Amino acid sequence: MIKHITCTVCPLSCEITLEIGENNEIISLTGNRCNRGKVYATKEHTAPERTLTTTVRVRGGVHPLLPVRTDQPIPKGKLKEAMLATAQLEVEAPVKMGTVIVENFLDLGVNLVASRDLERG
Ligand code: SF4
C-alpha cells in the first residue's frame, strides 16, 4: 500500500510517500528533504497526534466562550473524547491566557489551557 503524508514541520510542506507492508510496517519512505520529515511521517503513520483546539463555556465573561487548547499534542484517536469532555466544562471569568483549565486532561499527561485572556463582562 502507498500512503502520502504532507510534512507540516516546516513551510516547505514536503509530500512524503510511504510504502506500507502487510503488517503495517514502513518498507520505504521518500520525498522528505530532511530527517525531521522522516521522523514526522513515521510518527504520523504509527501514532498520529494533534493539538486539540476548541472552546469551553464561560460564566460572567465578556464572551460566552473561551478558546482553549492542549499544551501538547494528544493521540488523534482521543480527539472525539476530548471534544466531548470540553463540551462539559464551564469556567468562571476572568481567565488569563495560559491558565490551566484542566490538569492532566483525560489522563493524557497534557494540560488544557486558555488560549487568550477573557475579562469579566
Ligand atoms: S521534510 Fe524537512 S524540509 Fe520537508 S517539510 Fe518536513 S521538515 Fe521541512
Image: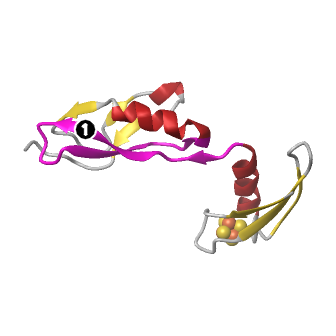
Q: Which quadrant does ligand 1 occupy?
A: bottom right
Q: Quadrant of the C terminus?
A: top left
Quadrant of the rendered image containing residue 61:
top left
Residue at left offset 16%, top offset 37%? 93
Quadrant of the rendered image containing residue 108:
top right
At mark 1, the secondary structure is strand
Residue at left offset 72%, top offset 48%? 43
Residue 60 percent coordinates (x, y):
11, 37
Residue 96 percent coordinates (x, y):
23, 43
Q: How many marks?
A: 1
Is 8 placed left or right of 30 in the picture?
left
Q: Under 8 Å from ligand 1: the CB of mark 1?
A: no
Disc 1 residue type (three-letter): Arg
- The residue pinned by badge 1 equals 57
Q: Quadrant of the N terminus?
A: bottom right
Is 15 placed left or right of 11 in the picture?
right
The residue carrying pointer 1 sits among few (fewer than 14), some (14 to 19) or many (20 or more) residues within 10 Å by Cα, namely some
Is 25 placed left or right of 11 in the picture?
right
The residue at the far bottom in this view is 12
Residue at left offset 76%, top offset 66%? 16
Residue 74 percent coordinates (x, y):
55, 40
The residue at the far top in this view is 107
Residue 20: say if magenta: no
Residue at left offset 73%, top offset 56%? 41
Magenta residues? 47-76
Q: Is residue 41 above or below residue 34?
A: above
Residue 71: say if magenta: yes
Tell which of 91 and 2 is nearer to you.
2
